Image (cartoon, grey):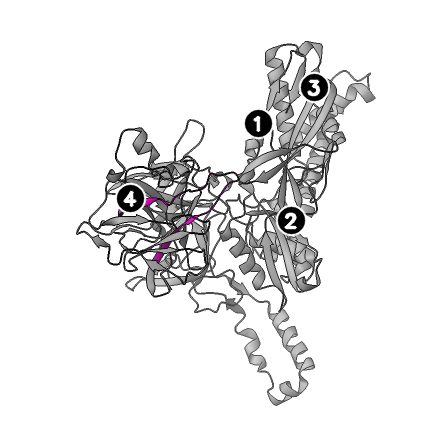
Amino acid sequence: MDFKFLPNLPKANLDDRTYQDLIEECLLRIPRYCPEWTNYNASDPGVTLVELFAWLTDQMLYRFNQVPRRNYVTFLEMLGVRLRPPKPAYTDVTFYLSASLSETYTIAQGVEVATLRTESEEAIIFSTDAPLSVGLPSVRHLLTAEELEERPTILRDRFSGTWTLRPDGEWQGLELAFFNEQPQEGNCFYLVFDPDSLIAGNVIAVTFKGEAATSTGINPENPPRLWEAWNGETWQPVLLSENDDHTEGFSFSEITRNGGNPLEGAEVVLHCPQSWAIETFGRYRGRWLRCTYTHTTPNQPAYIRSPRIVGLSVRSLGGTVSATQSTLISNEILGESDGTPGQTFQLQSAPILPRNEQEYLLVTPPGGLPQVWQEVENFADSGPNDLHYTLDSLTGEIQFGPLIREPQQLKRNTQQLGRQDFSREMEAFPPDESDWHDNLENQYGAVPPRGAALMMAAYRTGGGLRGNVQAGTIRILKSAVPYVAQVTNHHPARDGADGESLDAAVLRVPRMLRTRDRAVTPEDFEILAIQGGRGAVARARCLPSTKKEEAGIVNLVLVPQADTRHIQRGEGLDPSYFSLSSRLVEQVLSYLDERRLLGVEVRCKEPEYVGVAVQIEVALEPEYNNPGAQQEILSRLQVALYNFLNPITGGPEGKGWPFGRPVYASDIFTLFQAVRGVRYLGTLQLFELRHQEGEWHRILPKEPMIDPGPLGLICSWQNSQIRSSHVINLI
């Protein structure tokens, strides 16, 4: 019986030698074992024997290739194991309008944007996940507070009595100070927006008009203030870059330097959160922004007097919405049903991303109305009238329910065993042996009638590591959108992963059978965390609890998947690749929540990454004493170092740098000595790099080694240069 309804996995040969390869191999061995044999023509009887045994060996290899690996793969198929499809990357894309509009404008869901297509790489397409409304922001209150509070209670309304709202939406009035006359850290002011305006996720430009510029005592290029918005749970930073603050901390110094007048106004561009909640603090209700006087970096000059303004207005420049690396395909015709069980249909594009409510199969019987069929994982629980089908996400194959013919003898033996085990019930209800010849066929899932038209209403294709693009690379609109001038992604895309290989599936199955889909031991949590990431989690480590109060808490350290192709180009892996997104954390926690023991709390976090700078003198062989050869060897050394020092493919075993393992000088010596062209290695120094305040800083080591600590991982972070014709200094 051919079980076509089972998932088909790729199968490989254990020995791929052909009949001709075997003959040539035998002929090459003749001079060694029979030097007196010199006639290799086909007419020679010895060559005839070689051909005969080559044919027999070829047949044996053919049968041999069908046994172990194929049987193992078939076993996986019977277990219902499917290769994991690629996982799409996610990011936020920002649409900027060509001009401010007089009414709310909505950008539809599913707008496709892409990276720039080059000669070597195709464009990577992203589609927006939700509609984006660019509204008309309106400030209702300007409130000030002397102390910083998580949920403000003591607020002072500064618009009341002294400021008026003009018909064009601008507030004007007497000179107003944001902070105390003698500003103190924690002084802040709040802008409360009209809750009825659809401005969640909008890019808002707040225009401040100031009096003649007077010295506030700050450094305009690094003002001590922080812009935040309330997202319903906490205050989220909304100033993307200091270049977006054209007031320069309300000093208006650039306007003054250029001979302008602060009364003309300057803008602060703020990227508001997509989950910009409507909240009530005190007796004020709306969407909240706040600006706090605080030192964000060390040694910042402080305000010696409070900034003052005489006018305030707001407008929307565009908005931000989440996007997924995918291409939407709608209303694809699959063909007509022939009415046979187990028939299959092929979608034109693959792989297929996880389906949502709008993505389903439509079956239109002849002369009937369209029917919505339901996708299931398998047909184990499907009856003959259930409108079910399966869809292989990796290949795009749609499968309908099979017809299984059960042998009569097997059914009879089953009933006899049932009577022995449940004799009392069987005596009360004796079986009707006349039914043994009936119902020998079981239909699992309905079959579309003959002539029924099949159409996939919608599905999305995409995914892969290549979707983890850098910030600012998504700049192309695939189709024109009215009023949209440009689009970009201010943050890199995250969580994209390639499809699972057969080797990876073979390694996954023993772990799957071991855990039985239950998280009990630390190893169970690690295995299930990687499975829950659906390819986006490269490594996981369950940390032991060291405190009594942490009893019942499981601390998981997750290393996201990263595109290691950059290493082969000598670019290395930027530390930003390993930032853990909140979406991925929620996905893993949701997966573990269904499998953990009752009362166990799971926490996910990033490891503490430690950068390594390597400085070493490398002497080359004399024949490599030319700039071209030196550059080639330098490139090889860089690639080797990047491969060795990174959390994904690093370490002595090439499976990622071991958690907590230090870097020794002998590791680098062993690595570089294997590179062809290296004559000897001179002085070696290792420097530790720590991530502090958004930058990596070198820490001089006390010993020639790096100890990352119990949570540490090693990632490479270095550049290189040539010091002389024979010596390469890798820094």
> Of residues 642 and 204, which is closer to you in this image?
204
x and y percentages locating residue 400 in the rendered image? 46, 59
Gap between marks 4 and 1, in whole Å?
A: 45 Å
Question: N-terminal of the two: label 3 or label 2?
Answer: 2
In this rendering, the answer to whether 475 lies above or below 637 is below
Farthest front residue in view: 182
Residue drawn at x 60%, y 20% is 721
Residue drawn at x 62%, y 14% is 629
Gap between marks 1 and 3, in whole Å?
A: 18 Å
Q: Which residue is mark 1?
A: 570
Question: N-terminal of the two: label 3 or label 4?
Answer: 4
Gap between marks 3 and 2, in whole Å?
A: 42 Å
Residue drawn at x 64%, y 88% is 427
Q: Which residue is mark 3?
A: 618
Quadrant of the rendering where the C terminus is positioned: top right
SS for dot 3: strand
x and y percentages locating residue 91 in the rendered image? 43, 45
Q: Which residue is mark 4?
A: 207
SS for dot 2: helix
Tell me if 45 is positioned left or right of 161 in this view: right
x and y percentages locating residue 367 in the rendered image? 28, 63
Q: Quadrant of residue 317?
A: top left
Q: In the image, what residue type sits under mark 4?
A: Thr
Residues tagged 4 and 2 counted as in contact (Cβ below 8 A): no
Mark 4 burial class by Cα count in 10 Å: few <14, some 14-19, many 20+: many
x and y percentages locating residue 182 in the rendered image? 41, 48
SS for dot 4: strand
Q: In the image, what residue type sits under mark 2?
A: Val
Q: In the image, what residue type sits under mark 3?
A: Val
Query: Which tag is nearer the camera, tag 1 or tag 3?
Result: 3
Q: Which residue is mark 2?
A: 506
Query: Which tag is nearer the camera, tag 1 or tag 2?
Result: 1
